[in-house]
Each structure stands twice: as structure tokens, then as C-alpha cells.
Image: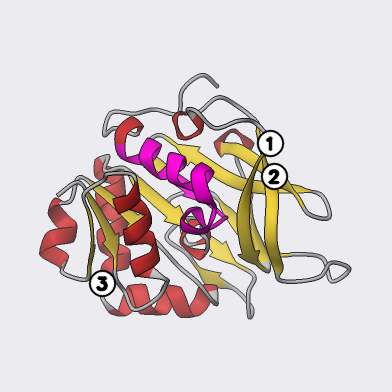
Amino acid sequence: MKVAIIDYGVGNLRSVEKAFAATGCEAIVSGDERELRVAERLVLPGVGAFGACMKALTERGFDRLVYERAREGTPLLGVCVGMQLLFEESDEFGSTRGLGLLKGRVRKFSNALVVPQVGWNRIHQTRPHALFEGVADGAFCYFVHSFYCEPRDETVIAGETEYGGRYASVVAEKNICGVQFHPEKSQAVGLRMLKNFETRINTDFYSDQR
């Protein structure tokens, strides 16, 4: 089994599964800890509120599983709120702790902006990365979110998007990757990045070419 999409009761799991299938990738949706422990790659989806996602993940014990497998070197891709969960905490509804795999916090867009941001926006590549193989700088992807990630270490930022200022829309550190947009809704660009995650992010991968 190459890719396991973590089923913790949150996220548009079947659409992500179908998107991987469209790339020719063997991917399954699973809430079985045994399968998640042996999968070669993990995808952490998420929609809605950060706190609700973190609560659902923790109730199943998958917070520990994701943390341990990522630290072992298993390639991990966080999608939308799944990317936000990779960080230490979120300001949504007070303060909620995240997985802490990446240093930083999740903040709300300025009240001067229309939130959530819904629709197509550009990914400006800030450094070369395997996720971007075959993806043009400035390519459009599909977003739906009211909060954004603010990494403490800016070197983890691989792509930025403009919405009232630039924010991190793609992050990567070693085997851990995250995309704020929905790749399953981002047509050819999203599919290419899923394929790159499957084929280009390895257990011994380090964020290259910084």
C-alpha cells in the first residue's frame, strides 16, 4: 500500500482518494491503525474548524500515530486544515494545540478581508521543491479557508499566496509537507502535486535546494 488517507471522521476523503487514483497512485482511505502504521505515505486531510479536527484526531489516537510516523521519516502531506494541524497551535476559538511537527501558529485573516477566502489563487514558489516538479510558478489552485499558517522558521515556506498580504500556502521540511489549497479541486496542478508527493518525497528526503 503506497498512500493512506487518514480517516478520522473529517474531510472530503473520497475526493482526495479519487484524485490520487487519477494520477495512477494506489491510495486508500483508512481509519485502521494497523494499516496507517504500515503505509508508505500518509495524507492528513481536514476541513472546518481546527479545534474540531484536532479533537477528532486525538480521540482516535491518531495524533500520536501521525507524530510518531512523521518523526520516523514517513512522508506526510497535510491538506487544507490538515496543513494547519502540522503546526504548534491555532488562534481559532481561543488557542488550540496542534501536532507541533512544524514550529509556528495558525492565525485568522484580517477582518478587512472577505473570509473565508474561496476560489482560485496563485502559488508563488519561494524556493525549488520536489512538490513543484512540472508545476509553473504562479499556477492557480483552489482555496477555501479563513485562517493561515505563520511558520516561525521561514525556511519551511515553499510557496506563498497573496490575500491581503503574502502567507504560506505550501510548506515543507524534510519528509513533512503541507498545502493550504485543495489539490483534489485544483485540476491538473493539484493532481501533479499529489503525484509528486507519491513519487518524489522519500523517507530520506530533505527539503532540498534551499
Q: Give the structural element (helix, strand or loop) at label 1.
A: loop
Queried whether the magenta region covers residue 65, the answer comes back as no
Q: Is the magenta stretch mostly helix, strand or loop?
A: helix
Visible residue check, residue 175: no
Please identify the residue farthest to the top as the structure is shown.
209
Q: Nearer the viewer, mark 1 or mark 3?
A: 1
Sooner in the amino-acid sequence: mark 1 or mark 2: 2
Residue corresponding to mark 2: 122
| Quadrant location, the C terminus | top right
> In whole angstroms, how far apart are the C-alphas of marks 1 and 2?
5 Å
Q: Which of marks 3 and 2 is in front?
A: 2
Residue 75: where, in percent of width, then height? Answer: 31, 42
Disc marking residue 61: 3
Q: Could you tell me how far apart the alpha carbons at marks 1 and 3 are, in whole angstroms?
A: 38 Å
Q: On the picture, is 110 further left or further right than 117?
A: right
**Picture quadrant of residue 65:** bottom left
Residue ID at (81%, 70%):
114
Q: Measured along the vertical axis of the image, is residue 155 above or below residue 11?
A: above
Residue extent of the magenta highlight: 177-198
The tag earlier along the polypeptide, 3 or 2, is 3
Q: Where is residue 146 in the image (x, y as percent from the top left)?
A: 68, 69
Q: What residue type is labelled 1?
A: Gly
The amino acid sitting under disc 3 is: Gly
Residue drawn at x 40%, y 50% is: 77
Within 10 angstroms of label 3, few (less than 14), some, or many (20 or more) residues?
few
Is disc 2 placed on a helix, strand or loop? Answer: strand
Q: Measured along the vertical axis of the image, is residue 153 above or below residue 167?
A: above
Question: Of residues 141 and 116, which is closer to you in this image?
Answer: 141
- Residue type indicated by callout 2: Arg
Please tell me which of labels 1 and 3 falls first in the chain. 3
Front residue of this view, candidates 113 and 150? 113
Instruction: Give coordinates of residue 3: x percent, y percent.
Output: 24, 50
